[in-house]
Image (spheres, rainbow, N blue to C red):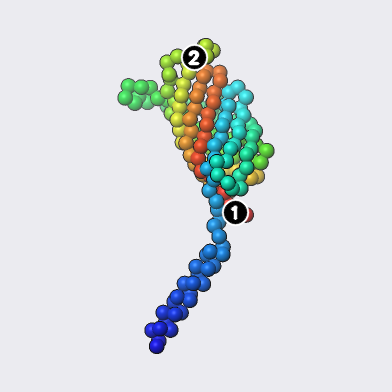
Amino acid sequence: MNAKLAVSAVLAAAAVTLASVAAAGPVATKQRVAFDVKILPQGTFVLTPFTAGALKRDLGTVSGNWRSISGREVMRDGQKVTIYNGLWTFTGKRGTLTIRERNELVDIGNDGNFDGQQDEIGIGTWTVVRGTGAYAAIKGSGRSAHEGLGRVWFARYEGVLTVPRG
């Protein structure tokens, strides 16, 4: 008899615990997003959420320390790769979001838009550093792609942001 009571008590406690956890709900939601950026000449971005959630479409300006950083050159299978680490701050209507990026650029060997500068492409990874407004307490990371056409430069950042529920 005591064994049956003990098992019943354990099962009842487990049911209460599970009900409490379920009632609390998730503490954060994840959203897949993209930042489409025109780094040069304007320094603008558009944030597009791919999944439903707290974050909404946003647009604004982007700034970074990329002009003041120098890259580290390495050779990979005979190709020169320049590695850059930098911070980007996206300032939109809904707040600011700062990310740290590590990207690897390669020269594609031509000047396709005839601006006198060699064109480059790059890929990288990024991580959220801090945010304000709608981006406060957000965490996340993703990958990036760059198209550097000398005086014109585009980038796309895709990833997953974890948005705290509040």
Q: Amino acid at mark 1?
A: Arg
Instruction: In the rendered structure, find residue 112 and report the number of the disc placed on it.
Output: 2
Instruction: In the rendered structure, find residue 165 and report the number of the disc placed on it.
Output: 1
Q: Residue furthest right?
A: 93
Please tell me how crowded label 2 is: few (under 14), some (14-19), or many (20+) other residues with Cα within 10 Å: few
Q: Residue furthest left?
A: 77
Task: Write the residue at 37% across / 26% down.
Answer: 74
Task: Write the residue at 58% across / 23% down.
Answer: 40
Q: Nearer the viewer, residue 154 or 71?
A: 154
Residue 146 at what x, y percent from top left? 49, 27
Task: Write the residue at 38% across / 22% down.
Answer: 80
Q: Nearer the viewer, residue 54 or 130?
A: 54
In the image, 75: left or right of 96? left
Q: Quadrant of the C terminus?
A: bottom right
Residue 67 at what x, y percent from top left? 55, 25
Q: Secondary structure at mark 2?
A: loop
Q: Secondary structure at mark 1?
A: loop
Task: Write the residue at 50% across / 70% down.
Answer: 17
